[in-house]
Amino acid sequence: MMIALSSLMLVAMVFLIIVYEGREPLLSPEAKIIKTQQTEVTSDPERQPLKVIETPSETDYSLQNDQLHITHDNGDTWHKVPIEIEHLFAGEYQGNRQELIGGSYEMTEEYTAFLYSEGEDWQYQTIKITYTDDKGKTWKESIVKDEALAMRFRKIDITNDGFWTVIFTFDRTMSQEASAIYLSNDQGENWQSISTPDSTRLVADGGFIDQNTGFISYGTLNPDAPTSLYVTNDQGETWEQSVFNMPNKYEEVFVIAKSPIEKEDHLELIMEQGPNGDYYRNGLIKAKFISKDNGQTWEFVEEVEPENEEMG
């Protein structure tokens, strides 16, 4: 009986050892959190639902899974954009990489277009636009410039009549840089370079409101006076500096002009305080100006709070 009992106890011990060794170890609450995070990281990213980054247009986008996608139905269906994610952020300025660089894309009722550069050498970049006119079903590519230096500021605009503009800057040294403006009258098929204003200050903004009238705004580093806004009314043949009739109390407050927009019988623009702005609400308050002579002179209208801003 003793031998039988001992044998039974031995078998039971072996069984318990096997069961104990085979079970998962008990984890502390902290260890459980770490394990959950590791599981999420190693899971297939393609199975993770894409999160919508909203835009003012009907087209939104996502940068998840190292790929750009667009959606027109708030994320129910997605279309992949055939651009490598690194190219979207290439250049001297690379943004925060959590969202597209402001100005590097345009989304209208007819077109969705992305401006970017390719090239392993920063001195020999190809400036390109990839766009769709059927909401992402098919994509086309347009080359703006074959050889260019790495971009800092970049902006693409598409008007309703098929007039496309690209503005970009390059070769920055401290507070100086070069700039370039390219125009297309045939939906991006062909591009023509036009002259730029006689200034090498850093570009703050720019754009065309029609095929003849365009603007470039300078002065982004520590400005202490209203920014230099230049206007052309002959598609870049000549440029003139706009005149701002600024109330005295605002002369060193509002200093960075955004690109104007067209209203019924005048032009409007928003002027910001710039990086050092501390006038009311920690620099968030802005100013509205209007022009009735096609951008030659500008009159102050009112202060604009962010929640009431309609432009810029």
Image (cartoon, grey):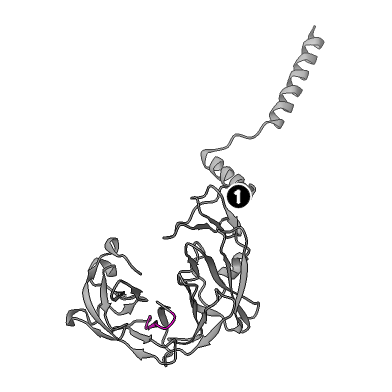
Pick the quarter of the image with the N terminus: top right
Residue 70: % across, % down: 54, 57
Decide: is 99 above or below 287: above
Residue on which disc 1 sits? 41
Q: Residue at the top extreme?
A: 1
Pick the quarter of the image with the C terminus: bottom left
Q: Nearer the viewer, residue 153 or 174?
A: 153
Disc 1 marks which amino acid? Val
Left or right, 133 with respect to 304, comes to: right
The residue positioned 27% from the left and 67% from the top of the image is 282
Magenta range is 211-220
Decide: is 195 above or below 255: below
Residue 146: % across, % down: 63, 82
Check residue 69 for magenta coloring: no
Report helix, strand or loop for mark 1. Answer: helix
Occupied quadrant, residue 216: bottom left
